[in-house]
Amino acid sequence: NDNKVANNLDDQVVRHQVKYLGLIENLRVRRAGFAYRRPYEAFLHRYKSLCPQTWPHFNGSAKEGVQVLVNYLGFESDDYRMGETKLFIRLPRTLFDTEDAFQQKKHDLAAIIQCRVKGRQQRKRYLEMRSAVTLIASYWRRFLAIKLLAKRRVAAHMIRTFIKGFITRNEPENDCNRAFVKNVRAEWLKRLAKQLPKNVLDKSWLISPKCCQEASELLKPVHQRCLVRKYVRSINPERKRLMDEKVVAEKLFRNKKASYGASLPNMFKENRLNNELETLRRSIFETKFKRGDEKTIYCLQVVKYDRHGYKQRPRILLLTNSAIYLLNEKDMKPKHRLPYKSISEVTTSALSDGLLVIKIPSDLKQDKGDLILDCKAHLIEVVTKIMIMIKDNDYDKLNIVGTGSISHACIDGKVGQISFTQGHFNGILKRKDGILEVVSNIGFRVREKR
């Protein structure tokens, strides 16, 4: 009613409202079996998210979109009807299932929207951070550029100073070359430390620049003295004695004996016997024949030439602190004993042979004559040790002859001849005229005195 009073119905007003609200059509549709109707545009707009083909936009008409949507949702052909402008659905369950699917789909849509919103927020934050990083990087590069510029200025100044110092390196020390000279000295000392001579025989020395010449002249003798001191401290008494013998050998034979140069690399030894002979010597000579106050100094196998016929006899040359012994090789019995004080002369040639003649005074020869020994390659060693034991400081008893011949005493006061010649081999032979000929290899020559 127009007065809005309860329990008072106006039939005319009721008819108007029923007609205005379209209830008659609803009743007719419900009577026909399709209780729900909806325009295509509204249905498609609400439920288009349920079908991938209609989401987010459908390019065709609304009716076509609804048809695609209901086909995707699996509506049976009896569950709906397609009108001119509306969609009609028979059962409420079909509508409720569609609405439930839409409500469930809202969560997915919300997640997508949330993802997009968060993505946009993060991108905005990222752009802000990138802008900040770009700004920081630009300021940092500016700082590095300023720092590099300062470093290059320092480097340029240093290079300029270095070049000026190089140009004026030979001038007296001044502001321009002071740093360069200091650097040159340091580098020269470093290189010198790596290239210092390692032994006293190495006379090499690093060439010094002009600014280091004074230091070089001072350091060279100091380092040489250090090497000498180190070397001297490393020498034991035995090696010192052997080196003293080498010094004596130099005084005796340098520029006088052709085989002296070949003996330089080899140190002298006290015993050159093999193990068998050494055992025999110790067991026989040392216990039976050697005098109690004597000490064995040197042993060597030699060849003795008889003073009559120059027959070769293998012997053991043994030097003690008081005499020379010649021992038989087989039984080590002494064949001859000669005190050093009884030696009148020691003779050898200037060639490369190993022949040694020990001359004995006539009152001590006992009709046997002088000793003729072939010491092979150890002549330098033997003569040096004999001369040391003779204690002839002026070495007057050593006679070194050149090519030619020398005489020696034989048995019964006779005189023999020994000839020294050069050939293409080393050897000792007796000529038909009775002279003992000593042939030396012509390849060995005495060094001329400088």
Image (cartoon, rainbow, N blue to C red):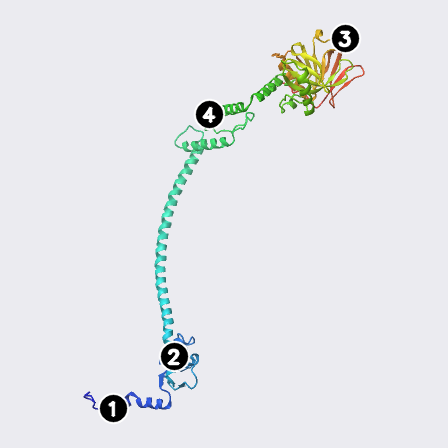
For the point 47% across and 31% down, which residue is it?
189
Can you tell which of label 1 and label 4 is closer to the viewer? 1
Q: Amino acid at mark 3?
A: Asp
Residue 303 figure quarter: top right
Q: Position of residue 275 (x, y in %)?
A: 68, 25
- Residue under label 3: 412
| Relative to 389, 69 lies left or right | left
Q: Earlier in the sequence, mark 4 or mark 2?
A: 2
Q: Which residue is mark 4?
A: 214
Residue named by callout 2: 98
Q: Secondary structure at mark 4?
A: helix
The reply to whether dot 4 and dot 2 touch (C-beta < 8 Å) is: no
Of the residues shown, which amino acid type is indicated by label 4? Glu
Q: CA distance from mark 3 to mark 2?
A: 156 Å
x%, y% of residue 410? 75, 11
Q: Residue 92 at x, y = what percent?
A: 37, 83
Q: Where does the N terminus fall, quadrant-wise?
A: bottom left
The answer to which of marks 1 and 2 sits earlier in the sequence is: 1
Task: Confirm or deny contact between disc 4 and disc 3 (CB under 8 A).
Answer: no
Of the image marks 4 and 3, the number of the one nearer the N terminus: 4
Query: Which residue position holds label 1?
Result: 14
Q: Give the SS element for disc 2.
A: helix
Q: CA distance from mark 1 to mark 4?
A: 135 Å
Specify whether residue 383 is in view.
yes
- Distance from disc 4 to disc 3, alpha carbons, whole Å, reads 73 Å
Q: The disc labelled 2 sits on which kind of residue?
A: Thr
Q: Nearer the viewer, mark 4 or mark 3?
A: 3
